[in-house]
């Protein structure tokens, strides 16, 4: 996706090298450009209803210039070439370097993909995400002492490109998904709450394939029921 966005703004490798060269003019030590595209969403269930959700898309570029003990940094959420040039001018400041950095040619370094390059947000349809949260609610309410249930499912995906003065020109993909479950239990007038959940760098279907919704619910209920039986800590002089 980051490559597509750069193409849309006519930013090819040659143009990025030229921008980096400008950034390096007053950086005798190091300089880099950091491009990022991010998308994130969240779905929230309360009172047995999926009441709200969020969705956000952002992209931008950061420019960094290192001159001895001084570091200049600027950011632009506009990938227009002129906007990037303004960020570069701000990052490199006005002080002239004694010896401008020697910008190295970009190296084609093979990378080992640690995560899938696929956006996890599309691994389930909107209906499947709602059904997933509803299953959590139904499963939790099988425990008679549970009075309230809240749950959320969220996902994010970042696509980055780093170009630096030491010849690095590297992309990286960063998926992240998470499920959270909270329950409130009540017995004989005593009320306790607990939560559980988890996530990782995979897609939403991982939760379904490994029955993690039931595991998270069971753990949240277990903690809450233990709290119902707990005794107050002893007080007084020791």
Image: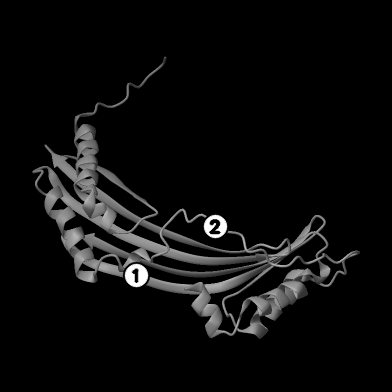
- Whether residue 13 appears in this view of the structure is yes
- Whether residue 47 appears in this view of the structure is no
**Pointer 2 residue:** 111
Q: Is residue 80 left or right of residue 1?
A: right
Q: Nearer the viewer, residue 139 or 150?
A: 139
Residue 98, image x, y percentages: 91, 64
**Residue at the extreme right of the image, as rendered:** 98
When the figure is inspected, residue 51 is found, relative to residue 192, above or below; the finding is below
At 22% from the left edge and 32% from the top edge, which residue is drawn?
Answer: 226
Q: Is residue 189 left or right of residue 40?
A: left
Label 2: few (<14), some (14–19) or many (≥20) C-alpha neighbours in 10 Å:
few
Q: CA distance from mark 2 to mark 1?
A: 33 Å
**Pointer 1 residue:** 54
Give the quadrant of the C terminus. Answer: top left
Q: How many marks?
A: 2
Q: Is residue 29 left or right of residue 208?
A: right
Q: Quadrant of residue 65?
A: bottom right
Label 1: few (<14), some (14–19) or many (≥20) C-alpha neighbours in 10 Å:
few
At 24% from the left edge and 34% from the top edge, which residue is drawn?
Answer: 227
Residue 9, image x, y percentages: 57, 84
């Amino acid at each position: 996706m980051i490559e597509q966005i750069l193409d849309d703004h006519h930013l090819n490798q040659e143009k990025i090298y030229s921008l980096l060269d400008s950034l390096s003019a007053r950086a005798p030590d190091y300089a880099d450009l950091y491009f990022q595209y991010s998308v994130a969403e969240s779905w929230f269930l309360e009172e047995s209803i999926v009441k709200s959700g969020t969705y956000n898309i952002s992209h931008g570029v950061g420019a960094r210039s290192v001159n001895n003990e001084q570091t200049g940094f600027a950011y632009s959420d506009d990938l227009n070439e002129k906007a990037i040039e303004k960020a570069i001018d701000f990052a490199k400041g006005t002080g002239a370097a004694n010896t401008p950095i020697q910008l190295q040619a970009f190296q084609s370094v093979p990378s080992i993909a640690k995560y899938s390059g696929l956006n996890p947000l599309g691994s389930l349809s909107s209906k499947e995400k709602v059904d997933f949260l509803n299953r959590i609610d139904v499963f939790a309410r099988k425990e008679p002492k549970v009075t309230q249930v809240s749950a959320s499912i969220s996902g994010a995906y970042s696509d980055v490109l780093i170009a630096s003065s030491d010849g690095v020109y590297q992309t990286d993909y960063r998926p992240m998904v998470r499920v959270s479950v909270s329950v409130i239990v009540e017995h004989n007038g005593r009320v306790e709450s607990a939560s559980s959940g988890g996530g990782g760098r995979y897609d939403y279907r991982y939760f379904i394939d490994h029955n993690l919704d039931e595991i998270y619910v069971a753990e949240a209920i277990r903690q809450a029921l233990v709290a119902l039986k707990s005794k107050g800590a002893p007080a007084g002089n020791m």
